[in-house]
Image: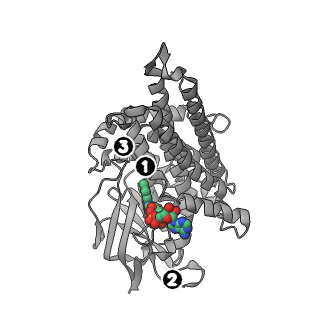
């Protein structure tokens, strides 16, 4: 069977050896766990997170000054893509651990960076980012979790849902309301570091979802959780900017990479099936009508790969690329879902068997729609830049912090 390159030749010419390393790790450490993770949807898989942490991968975008890899967004994308090709849950665990790094890299004080980033880079500390709430959903400014000053502390009350790595994270980056909703300039939200052993913080029991078995995106409850002023990230009122910039600059490329890895697995699974299933004097792969559908799948996959890699490269280069990041996340999910549906049909009844990997991939890909902006959110953002009144371009505003060529020691 011809093997497809997972890189985009003109964009990532020197990274073949790295991708090989990621793929070897995935084959040795992730693949043997897939079956068990699938059959135990009530369990969270901490071992995989620890193994990836030991590789230093959670520090992919952390500078060397803080012990990180300083590897950038393109290598981060290739990492997530490699893991997701073998297990969507492994890709999800990796991306969810890397996403909150943005909060500290972009807005953390020197003290916070010095305290937290070396521990993330060495794999001792896992982070989460907690924004979403049951009622407000993607309407971030509608959140109801509050933080109020009490002496020199802040006291947080509220609930967060769907928080990636909720059950694994040692420190949560929590966005809470610190002023009324009508506060001018959307300065009503603030971000806080909340350590997992703070009194009043409860991680609710893990409940299995449709797919991504082994990955937790659960609920956090805050009942009078007290944190010191030193745990405020950025300025009071920066919470919306922190949530939005993290979602654009890390969430979009990470989710695109996750979709891409699952999409590649869908393609591999389908070609293998068609080439092995006998029909007439040959196999299903010989039938022109089925080859035509595989051609359509490949066209989507190639475009998705190009989009994901180019968006990450532009980020590494410090170029303005918000629309590219948004489009990449949007189309990587959308086209992977289309390929997943093609694949289901091409597999006939085999698609429905729970001992066959395709139904896992089909379930897993449903999970990349909602995080880091739903399809509606992406299209609204793209329309805004096309029709005037473009929103803040985070890749331009934070270029000195996202670029791979930023000064490091
Ligand atoms: C796998 C996974 C991991 C996640 N990880 C995290 C995490 O780490 N941290 C975190 O904070 N959250 C996380 N989330 C939550 C995610 O960010 C939310 O699901 C997302 O913001 C959408 O919110 P919602 O699901 O409540 O949908 P809703 O906001 O209720 O939207 C429902 C539907 O209505 C549409 N809609 C909503 N508002 C509008 C509008 N104004 N105009 C047009 N259409 C609209 C949406 O596009 C969607 O189709 C995760 C979710 C998943 C599935």
Residue picked out by circle 2: 181
At mark 2, the secondary structure is loop
Q: CA distance from mark 3 to mark 2?
A: 42 Å
Q: CA distance from mark 1 to mark 2?
A: 32 Å
Q: Label 2: how many residues lie within 10 Å, few (<14), some (14-19) or many (20+)? A: some
Of marks 1 and 3, the one in the foreground: 1
Q: Position of residue 18 (x, y in %)?
A: 53, 35
Q: How many marks?
A: 3
Whether residue 74 is situated above or below residue 129 in the rendered picture: above
Q: Are marks 1 and 3 in contact (CB under 8 Å)?
A: no
User: Would the CB of label 1 be found within 8 Å of ligand 1?
Assistant: yes
Q: Could one spot residue 5 in this view of the protein?
A: no
User: Going 58% across and 34% down the picture, which residue do you hit?
Assistant: 298
Circle 1 Cα neighbour tier, 10 Å, few/some/many (<14 / 14–19 / ≥20)? many
Q: Is residue 320 above or below residue 392?
A: above
C-alpha span from label 1 to label 3: 14 Å
Which residue sits at x=30%, y=43%? Answer: 37
In this orientation, which residue lies closer to the viewer: 217 or 69?
217
Q: Which residue is mark 3?
A: 51
Choose top left, top right, bottom left or bottom right for residue 407.
bottom right
| Mark 1 vs 2, N-terminal side | 1
Q: Nearer the viewer, residue 53 or 393?
A: 393
| SS for dot 3 | helix
Query: Residue 394's mark?
Result: none
Q: Mark 3: give few (<14), some (14-19) or many (20+) Cα within 10 Å.
A: some
Q: In this rendering, would 399 be left or right of 356?
A: right
Kindly check if marks 1 and 2 are in contact, taking CB atoms under 8 A apart as contact. no
Earlier in the chain: of badge 3 and badge 2, it is 3
Residue at horizontal 64%, vertical 55%? Answer: 406
Image coords of residue 320 (percent x, y): 69, 57
């Amino acid at each position: 069977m011809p093997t497809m390159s997972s890189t985009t030749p003109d964009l990532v010419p020197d990274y073949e050896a790295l991708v090989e390393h990621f793929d070897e790790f995935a084959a040795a450490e992730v693949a043997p766990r897939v079956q068990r993770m699938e059959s135990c949807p009530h369990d969270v898989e901490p071992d995989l997170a620890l193994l990836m942490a030991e590789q230093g991968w959670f520090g992919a975008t952390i500078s060397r000054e803080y012990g990180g890899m300083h590897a950038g967004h393109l290598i981060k994308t290739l990492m997530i893509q490699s893991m997701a090709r073998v297990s969507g849950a492994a890709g999800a665990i990796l991306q969810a651990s890397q996403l909150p790094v943005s909060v500290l890299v972009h807005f953390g004080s020197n003290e916070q960076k010095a305290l937290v980033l070396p521990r993330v880079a060495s794999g001792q500390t896992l982070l989460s980012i907690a924004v979403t709430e049951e009622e407000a959903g993607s309407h971030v400014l509608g959140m109801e979790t509050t933080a109020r000053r009490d002496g020199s502390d802040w006291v947080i009350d509220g609930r967060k849902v769907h928080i990636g790595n909720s059950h694994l994270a040692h420190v949560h980056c929590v966005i809470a309301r610190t002023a009324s909703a009508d506060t001018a300039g959307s300065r009503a939200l603030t971000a806080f570091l909340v350590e997992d052993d703070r009194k009043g913080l409860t991680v609710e029991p893990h409940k299995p979802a449709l797919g991504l078995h082994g990955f937790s995106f659960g609920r956090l409850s805050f009942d009078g959780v007290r944190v010191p002023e030193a745990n405020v990230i950025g300025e009071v009122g920066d919470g919306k900017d922190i949530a939005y910039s993290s979602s654009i600059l890390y969430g979009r490329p990470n989710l695109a990479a996750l979709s891409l890895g699952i999409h590649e697995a869908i393609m591999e699974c389908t070609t293998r099936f068609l080439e092995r299933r006998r029909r007439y004097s040959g196999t299903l792969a010989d039938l022109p009508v089925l080859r035509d559908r595989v051609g359509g799948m490949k066209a989507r996959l190639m475009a998705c790969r190009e989009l994901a890699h180019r968006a990450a490269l532009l980020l590494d280069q410090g170029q303005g690329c918000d629309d590219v990041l948004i489009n990449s996340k949007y189309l990587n999910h959308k086209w992977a879902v289309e390929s997943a549906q093609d694949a289901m049909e091409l597999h006939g009844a085999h698609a429905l068997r729970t001992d066959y990997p395709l139904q896992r991939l089909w379930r897993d890909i449903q999970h990349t729609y909602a995080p880091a902006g739903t399809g509606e959110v992406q299209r609204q953002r793209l329309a805004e830049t096309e029709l005037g009144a473009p929103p803040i371009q985070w890749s331009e505003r934070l270029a000195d912090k996202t670029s791979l060529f930023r000064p490091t020691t």
